[in-house]
Amino acid sequence: MSELVEEIPAAESEPAASIEYPHLRRNFFLGVFNGAMFSFAESLLSVDTVLTWFVQQLGGSNFLIGLVGPMRDAGWFLPQLFVSKWQERHSLKMPLYRKVTVVRTLAWFTWTVLMLTSKDLAFVLLVFFVAYAIYSLSGGVSGLSFMDVVAKTIPIRRRGSYFGGRLFLGGLLSLGAGLIVSLMLNDTNSADFPANVGWISVIGWVAATLGLLAFSQVIEPPGDVRPEPNTMVSHVRRAARLPRHNHNLRYFLIARVVLFLSYIAAPFYAIYSIDVLNAPVWIIGLYVGVRTVASLAINPLWARLSDRRGNRLVMRAATAFGLAVPAWAIGVPLLAGALQVSAEVMSFLFVPIFVLLGLYETGVGIGASNLLLEIAPIDDRAIYIGFTNTILGVAYFSTVVSGLLVDWLGYRGVFILALMFFAIAFWALSLVREPRELEKDAA
């Protein structure tokens, strides 16, 4: 057996679905419905388009604009290492998920009410950020429960279809999100700002609440617990040693960290097109729409590759699409300027960027979580996922400086940094071994 195989704990094997995965049809449906509702809700309040523009219109600085994305995703990731200590001692994770559902729905409801009722833009901005932080951090508390429940209820070779189904049905619903956003943000709409965004948020809140309630009905089988007590310090130390002993985890972490760092550019693609290329504001709805269509078109391919060929391949292919995003943002406007294309054409130059983002994000949405679930040994799943996601939360939260980087380096400087991060991720993923191949070698 090779040294590499000995270094990496064997990936979890797939037992017979009828024995190890009871209630599979019910749990599969509820999980897909949950994902579809959340995809729709987050398409309506897209971080990269609607919310960044919303914060800008409230008078937020570039720093605050750049803070929106890290707050959502870093908040979801950051608490999970600390939650994993608690989770290792409990065989059922769904009770915690259900309790946190109440907090998340109340937070979303709070900022929605303020959008609809208040004309004090500074107050709306303050309450939005506080409520959004609570929503994101509470999602992180329940996020590890979600991942563990998925691992216990969905077989390995069905997870590509599972996450793909969540994104595909969400994408179908989100076809209407772009239209809703365009109509609500159009100058002809009678609702003034910020109430126009508030009505978008109402629809998103209903969808997100339905999704949370659906997953709360998943039937979770009890899992193993770690009986020996440990302090938080020893728990963190044990987690910190994991990348040293697991080759796949080490390079997976490198790839995921730099992919998260590439999000320094994400909030500014739409804003650059409006402020620099003179695109109309309603084009935000078009961006949401083409991103959704691209996600739908590529989804069956990513899901099929995940189930049949593994998630390393999905991640590398998706990262290649991601690499093309900042490359397009840097190169195409320069080329168009040199060719002296018309102002009308120039204003639509960034539409393909959101096509590429749809291709990239769907691949990562299917591949990343599945690859981590396969890398993590069953007995240490909680600490593997918790440690990885907390590291990713730190990495993503560091992108709060994106607004300051735009002030210092300009839009193109930030796009160049994103390009470099994508290139590093592509290299790191080339060093990850497909867990299913390692399992065969170990056998």
Image (cartoon, rainbow, N blue to C red):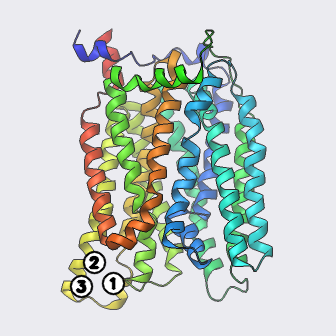
Q: Earlier in the sequence, mark 1 or mark 3?
A: 3
Residue at the disc numbered 1: 346
Task: Locate residue 54, reporting x and y percent.
Answer: 60, 73
Q: Quadrant of the C terminus?
A: top left
The answer to whether any part of residue 37 appears in the image is no
Structural distance between the alpha carbons of marks 3 and 2:
6 Å
Task: Locate residue 234, reporting x and y percent.
Answer: 53, 19
Callouts 3 and 2 close, C-beta under 8 Å: yes
Callouts 2 and 1 close, C-beta under 8 Å: yes
Q: Is residue 361 left or right of residue 144?
A: left
Task: Locate residue 377, reporting x and y percent.
Answer: 46, 18
Q: What amino acid type should be assigned to the residue bearing mark 3?
A: Gly
| Quadrant housing residue 59 | bottom right
Callouts 1 and 3 close, C-beta under 8 Å: yes
Residue at the disc numbered 3: 337
| Quadrant housing residue 241 | top left
Is residue 85 positioned above or below 125 on the image? above
**Residue pictured at 30% horizontal, 52% vertical:** 421
Between 178 and 375, which is closer to the camera in this rendering?
375
Task: Locate residue 319, reporting x and y percent.
Answer: 32, 49
Q: Earlier in the sequence, mark 2 or mark 1?
A: 2
The answer to whether any part of residue 222 appears in the image is yes
Q: What amino acid type should be assigned to the residue bearing mark 1?
A: Met
**Residue pictured at 59% horizontal, 71% vertical:** 55
Is residue 360 positioned above or below 97 on the image? below
The disc at residue 333 is 2
Q: Quadrant of the N terminus?
A: top left
Q: What amino acid type should be assigned to the residue bearing mark 2?
A: Pro
Is residue 67 positioned above or below 228 on the image? below
Between 27 and 432, which is closer to the camera in this rendering?
432
